[in-house]
Amino acid sequence: MLKNKKSTLLLVVFVIIIALSVTACGSSKDKNSSPEETAGGAKVSTDGGTKSLEQTFYIYDTVVNIKVFGDKAGQKNMDDIQQMLERMDKEFSRTKEDGELYAVNKAAGKEAVAVSDETLDIVKQSLKYAEEMDGLFDPTIGPLVDLWNIGSGGESVPPQAEIDKAKALTNYKDVIVDEAAKTVKLAKEGMVLDMGGIGKGYAADRIADYLKEQGLDSAMINLGGSSIIALGNKPNGSPWNIGLQDPDQSRGSQLGTIKISDEVIDASGVYERFFMQDGVRYHHILDPRTGFPSQNGLKSITIMSPNATDADALSTGVFLMGLEDGMKYLESLPEKVDAFFITDDNKIYATSDLKKRLQLTDPTYTFAN
């Protein structure tokens, strides 16, 4: 389904700070034990009579928090998850020199590079989204990401000639995948694959798959606030309560809440990484059609779907479509995907089912549809 998002990783989007404290597991009447720490660093506690294990890692250039409920949860689960994240972070990074994506980019225009099944899979999925979104999601947007460098030092609009040069190297159709040989090749020298648009979502899905295989079906998986999976329900059977962050306020301020069960929340916005020039906000969501950050009247978009990889790609691709086309596209999808858009005038446009579930708490925001 769709497009390149969080250009380089840290996008902590507007939505999503998890209300995963005492209320995440039951009522205020529940008696919760004081957390203890395992030798591996995980915090063990009892929430509402149910054992929970929680650990925080700094991976993917962001803070990752995993909280798992159930008597089966142990430090080995957290260790396994950390190893998975570190492996994917290295293999999917365009900047880590010992990673597979780095090797593919270095060999651009020269030769095919053998990759692991996991890297092959994420590249194939990114190309599928690119095709389904007519190139709005484009995993070869790396040259534009590097040129603008927003959030990592870029503070001015690059020369048009440089933008045109980078844009000419952005074309997902120039990625050659040989499934039999398990190789990936970039047709032109200077091309750069960038998995920032789906990397966190893909990793979140792999963690969820692992936990299910281990018989752990109640958990919160939070990759930096930008990809969040609520696995199953809370231990008491009730849905999770998620706080939706106000994109105009410091992190922690909420515009509303929503209850979810076995669902993913993912978002993209213009407020996290940007610079101002001549009164214009230049943010990190780059449009491969123009080579510039999108300027379409949207402040943010939040996607809710069954899996995080789809949601990750959709949140950027649909953002670039704009409000009207983006809403139509989501409604046309065969699978169940909900979303809400926030425009520059703080109006919220939500898909019909999602509107019923959103509880706004900040009067600054109102529904427009």
Image (cartoon, rainbow, N blue to C red):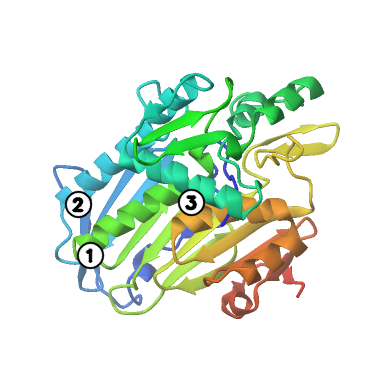
Q: Amino acid at mark 3?
A: Gly
| SS label for mark 2 | helix
Question: Which quadrant, please, contains the C terminus?
Answer: bottom right
Look at mark 3 in the image and give the residue it sits on: 225
343 vs 225, left or right, is right
Q: Which residue is mark 1?
A: 216
Query: Sequence-wise, which precedes: disc 3 or disc 2?
Result: 2
Q: Residues within 10 Å of mark 1 (few under 14, many from 20)?
A: many
**Residue beneath the point at 36% across and 60% down:** 220
Mark 1 and mark 3: Cα distance apart in space: 22 Å
Quadrant in the rendering for residue 365: bottom right
The residue at 32%/71% (across/down) is 25
- Badge 2 vs badge 1, beta-carbon distance below 8 Å: yes
Q: Is residue 128 visible?
A: yes
Establish if 282 lies above or below 24: above
Task: Say if 46 sits above or below 193 in the image.
Answer: below
